[in-house]
Amino acid sequence: MNVISKFHGFVASSSGKSGPASLPAEDISTNSNGPKQDSLFDDDPEDLFAEATEEVSLDSPERDVLLSDGPSPAITPITPPTSVITPRIGLAHDDMFTHSSFDEIEEEEGGDSFDIHIAVSDPEKVGDGMNAYMAYKVTTKTSLSLFKTDEFSVKRRFSDFLGLHSKLASKYLHIGYIVPPAPEKSIVGMTKVKVGKEDQSSNEFVEKRRSALERYLMRTVKHPILLKDPDVLQFLESSELPRAVSTQALSSAGLLRMVNKAADAVNKMTIKMNESDAWFEEKQQHFENLDVQLRKLHASVESLVCHRKELSVNTAQFAKSAAMLGNSEDHTALSRALSQLAEVEEKIDQLHQDQANADFYLFSELLGDYVRLITAVKGVFDHRMKTWQKWQDSQLLLQKKREAEAKLQFTNKPDKLQQAKDEIKELEGKVQQGERDFEQISKTIRKEVSRFEKERVKDFKTIIIKYLESLVQTQQQLIKYWEAFLPEAKAIS
Amino acid sequence: MQEGLDDGPDFLSEEDRGPRAVNVDLQTDATLQVDISDALSERDKVKFTVHTKSTLPNFKQNEFSVVRQHEEFIWLHDSFVENEDYAGYIIPPAPPRPDFDASREKLQKLGEGEGSMTKEEFTKMKQELEAEYLAIFKKTVAMHEVFLCRVAAHPVLRKDLNFHVFLEYNQDLSVRGKNKKEKLEDFFKNVTLLRITPDVDDFFEHEKTFLLEYHNRVKDASAKSDRMIRSHKNAADDINRIASSLYSLGTQDSTDVCKFFLKVSELFEKTRKIEARVAADEDLKLADLLKYYLRESQAAKDLLYRRSRSLVDYENANKALDKARAKNRDVLQAETSQQLCCHKFEKISESAKQELIDFKTRRVAAFRKNLVELAELELKHAKVKGLVTVRSPFIVKGVTGCLCMRKRGSMRRYSGLKTVQ
C-alpha cells in the first residue's frame, strides 16, 4: 500500500463535510511527549508532501496507480531519519482528493494481505555490571516493497524500543492515532539481569520481555500509517541506531515526562467540552467500561497463573512424598502402584507448569497489552479535547481582538489599526486551522477506533483459540497418563 | 450461622451411603448394623442421628435411633483405649472434630465484600461456598460413620457395654472432653517406649520399623496432598472469577464481540465446574484415604506401644520374682504377678499379630479401591473437559496434534531434584 494514497484518503471529506480538511500543521518535535504550547502553530512547517501532491491529478491512470498496491516510483516519502516530520499536505490541493474516500481505503485494507512478520529472539547479555544490557535480535520477514530486502535482522536493546515509541508517540498521538504503547520498564527485573543472576526468575523476566517486545513491534507494523513511518523503517532495517538516552527513567527527560503527565491530568480536569457528537461520548463511556472490565479480568487471570504455578509445585512435592510412601510400603504390588502414582503426578506437575505458561503468555499478557492500549486510546480522546480547547481559545482571542479593533476604529491611530487588522487576519487563519484540526482529529479517531475494535476482536479470537488448543492438549496428556496408571492400580491384590 | 445452612432431615440422600465406608473394606453383618441416618448442623455443633438395626438380644428393640454429638464419639473411643482388655486390638481411630471454621470465615468475607461485586457474582460465590460447606459436612458425617462401623465389625469391640450404651441410651451422655493435661499425657506416652525396646520376635520387630516409617510418610503425603488439592481449588475459583468477568464483558452490548465473550464465558464456566469436581474427587479418594490411614497407623502404633509396655511389665515382674526368690520373701505374690504379666503379654501379642495382619489387608484393599476409582474419575473428567473444549463453537476442525505450547527451553525449572523419572 502506498503512503500517499493513505494520506489522500484521510484528507478527503468522506462524510460530506464541506471545506478543506488537512492534517494539522503542528510542528511536532521529538523531545517531549507533553502538551504543546501555542508556539507550535508554526507558520512554516516542513511541507513534506507538497511536491508529491502536485503530481497528483484527477486523471484516472495516476490515481489508479496511487490507489493500487504496488510501488509508486514517482512518489517516495523519504526524509533524513532524524529530521522532524510534519505530515502536512498543502491546503491548495484539497479539492483534488475528494474522490478517494474512506470507504475505498477500507476496501483496500480488507483485500490487502498483510505480509510482514517480525520476530524478536536471541536475547544476549552485552557488557558487565550496571552498564550491561540485553541485546535482542529483531528479524523481519516481509514481501512488502517498502523494504529493501525480504529478510533482514538487526540487534536492538530495550531503550531502542522505548526510543522508537517515544518518537512515534510525539508524532502521531496528537493527531489522533492510537500508537501502541511500549512494554514497561522494570528496574528490578533489569537489575537482576545486570547483576548476572542466572536463575529462573531472571530467565522468565527476559522471556517475558522478549515476548512483549515482539508483540509491540507486530502491533506497531500492523498499523498502516506507522508501518510507513521512517523511524519504524530505520528501526527495523538500519544496523546502527543512535542511542535513545532520553528514555532512561531517571534522566531529565524522564522527569520532564512525569511532570508533563501530572500537568496533563490537571488540565484534563479543567477542560469542559461541549460534546456535540454523541458518537464520541458513547465511545468514551465504552472505553471507560472496557478499561474497568479488562483490568478486573487481567487481575483474575494473573491470579490463575499464580495458583497454577503453586499447583505445579505442590503436585511435584506430593509426587515425591508418594514415592517415599511407596518405598516404605511392604506390600509389593501396592508399593509399585504408589511409585507409579508418584510418576504420574510428577508428569502432571509438568503439565500444570506448561498450562500456567500458556495461561500467562497467551492470555494474561494479551490482557495487559490491551489495558495499556486502552490507556493510549483514552489519551487520544484527551488530545481531541485539547485540540478543541485550543480552537476555542483562539476563537475567544479573535473575538477580543475584533472588539479591540472596533474600539480602535474611533481613535485616530492608523498604524495601530493596521496592526490590529493584521492580527485579526492572522487569528482568523488560526481559528480556521483550529477548526480543521479538530475535525481532522475527530475523523482520525473514528477511523482508529474502528480499526482498534476490529483488531481487538481478531486478537482475542486468535488467542482464545490458541489457549483452548492448549487446554485440549493438556487434557489429552492427562488421559494418557491416567490410562497408563489404571492397570497398575487394578493389579494390586 | 447463616440461614439456609441448617440442614434438615432430608439432607442425606440414598446414593451418598455407598461410598461412605470407602476407606475401610467392611463386611456388613446382619446381626449389628450401624449408620448415621441424619445430621444437623447448628451454630458450632453437629448433631448426628445414630441409627442401629440389630438382632442381638442385648438391645431392647430391633431398630432404634439416638442423637449424638462429636464429644460423645470421642468419649467412646477413649473408653476403648483405656480399657485394659482391649490392649491387644487396634482401636479404630476417633473421627476428627467437625471443622467448619475455614468455610465460615469465607462466608463471612463474602458477606463483607458483597458491595464490591455484581449480583451474579455474589450469588455464584455464595453457591460455591454453600457447596463447599456441604462437602465438608458430608465428609464429617462419613468419618463418624466409619468409626462406628469399624467398631460394629470388630468381633470383640462390638460387644462392649459402653458401645451399647452409646447406641441405645437416648439421653445425653454428659461426657467431658479431655483437658490439656490429659492430652499431653497421651502425647508423651507414645514417644518414649516404642523405639527403645528391640524385639525378639521378628514379626513385631519388622512391624515396628515398618509402622514407624510408614506413619511418618503417610503424614507427609497427607499434608502434601492437602496442599495440592487446595491449590487446585484456588485455581478453580480463579476460573470462576474469569468466567464472571467475561460474562460482564459480554453483556455490555449485543455486538459480535460481546456475543463472543459470552460464549467464552460459558466455556470457562463449564471448565471450572469440571476442575472443581476433579479437586473434590481427589480430595475424597486421595486426601481422605491418606488422612484415614494416618490415623489408623497411629492406632496400630498405639497397639505396639501397649504390647511393649506389657513386655516391660513382664520383664519387671520377672526381675521382681528373681529378687523375691533370692530373698525368699513374698515369692507367691511375685509368682502370681509374674504369671499375670506373662499371660497378659502373650494374649496381647497373639491378638496384636492378627490385628496387624488384618490392618495390612484392609489397607491394601482400601488403597486399591481408592486408587482405581481415582484414576477412573480423573480419566472421566479429562475426557469430558476435552470434549467440552473441542465441541465449543470456536474450534471448528478437530484439534488433535497441533498446539501452541511455549518452548520449554528457557522455562525449565532449575531447582528441585527429579527423583522419579
Image (cartoon, rainbow, N blue to C red):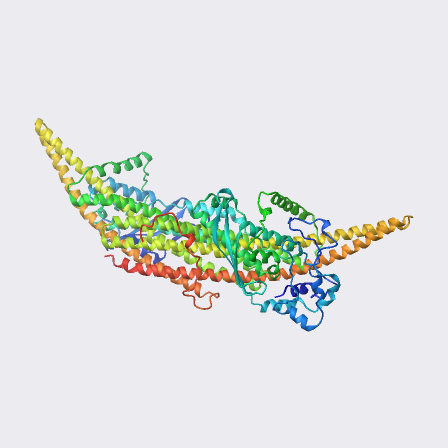
Residue found at x 43% / y 48%: A200
- Answer whether residue A245 is visible to the viewer in this image: yes
Closer to the camera in the image, B13 or B111: B111
Q: Is residue A407 visible?
A: no
Q: Is residue B350 left or right of residue B381?
A: left
**Quick check: B232 left or right of A371?**
left
**Where A458 sits versus B186, above or below?**
below
Q: Vertical placement of A8 versus B198: above or below? A: below
Residue A380 lies in quadrant:
bottom right
Q: Position of residue B412 (x, y in %)?
A: 40, 52
Residue B366 percent coordinates (x, y): 27, 53
Pick whichever, B249 or A337, lies toward us: A337
Between residues A478 and B58, which one lies in front from this camera angle? A478
- Spot occupied by residue A267 in the image (x, y as percentages of width and height): 68, 47
Rendering quarter of residue B30: bottom left
Q: Which residue is drawn at the image coordinates 36% and 58% (left, top)?
A: B378
Residue A36, given in percent of the width and then of the height, sits at: 69, 49
Count the labels in the image: 0
Which residue is more in the foreground, B122 or A161? A161
